[in-house]
Image: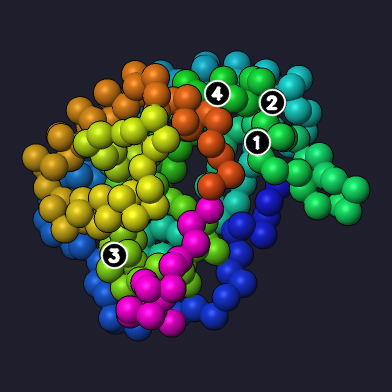
Amino acid sequence: MENNYFGALHEKYTNPFETGELNLVNTFYVKYVKRTFDIIISLSAVIVTLPINLVIGIITFFDLGRPIFFVHERPGLGERPFKMIKFRNMTNEVDENGKLLPASERITKMGKFFRQTSLDELLQFWLILQGKMSIIGPRPLLMSYLPRYDRRQHMRHAVRPGLECPLMHYSADGPSWEERLENDVWYVEHISFKTDVIMIIRLVKLVFNSNRTKVRSEKIDGEFKKNEESRNEGSVG
């Protein structure tokens, strides 16, 4: 496995959902309607993509060897960690000091192809079926980011994480962290059947957005670093 330290916390942190400072979104739609759609869609996807995943697994084995899966923790609903699983797409090459090389230097040609076509996301349907994720919702980011969010940004974890929470527009360079996190919070604040339909339409368009797929396949080293202004305005913990 690689980059396991990304699945751990290295800064002092208090979960605002456990302290009662923030609450989960528990509307009828979220608890029953949205979950029902997640089960139906993910079960269908698991069945349809099973042979595709088998082929990807075989290719990954010959491309990178064992293990073929990359598993580590991500914050889920209420910021409780869960195990995310993906097919590996990077080597474990290190520099002369024994430190892993940048991700952009370790990703293989097949790994870049899988990222560009979103085939590396197919295993997430298993997590959706288990109730750990949702079709639409804020993407689960790194555990190490939790202490860096301000109070508003923590609200992205008031619902289950999802495959994607698409923005309306994507530039060639991709959205900034501020735009992305604000979009996640907006989704939480406006979650409804109508909002999810809009997001699913955006998600379909996103899959066929050549600019976005190129950004996703190449720009994989960006990191969220909280600025001093937001650090001084209501950081949690």
Quarter of the rendering containing residue 9:
bottom right
**CB of mark 2 within 8 Å of CB of mark 4?**
no
Secondary structure of residue under mark 1: helix
Quarter of the rendering containing residue 165:
top left
> Quick one: label 1 or label 3, which is nearer the N terminus?
1
Quarter of the rendering containing residue 92:
top right
Left-right relation of 155 to 91? left
> Quick one: label 2 or label 3, which is nearer the N terminus?
2
The span from disc 3 to disc 4 (Cα, nearest Å) is 31 Å
Residue drawn 43% across and 82% down?
237
| Dot in front, 4 or 1 | 1
Residue 149 or residue 22, whichever sits in front:
149
* Tag shown at residue 104: 1
> Quick one: label 3 or label 4, which is nearer the N terminus?
4
Magenta residues? 223-237
Secondary structure of residue under mark 2: loop
Question: What residue is disc 4 on?
Answer: 114
What kind of secondary structure does the magenta stretch mostly adopt? Answer: loop
* Tag shown at residue 155: 3
The span from disc 1 to disc 2 (Cα, nearest Å) is 9 Å
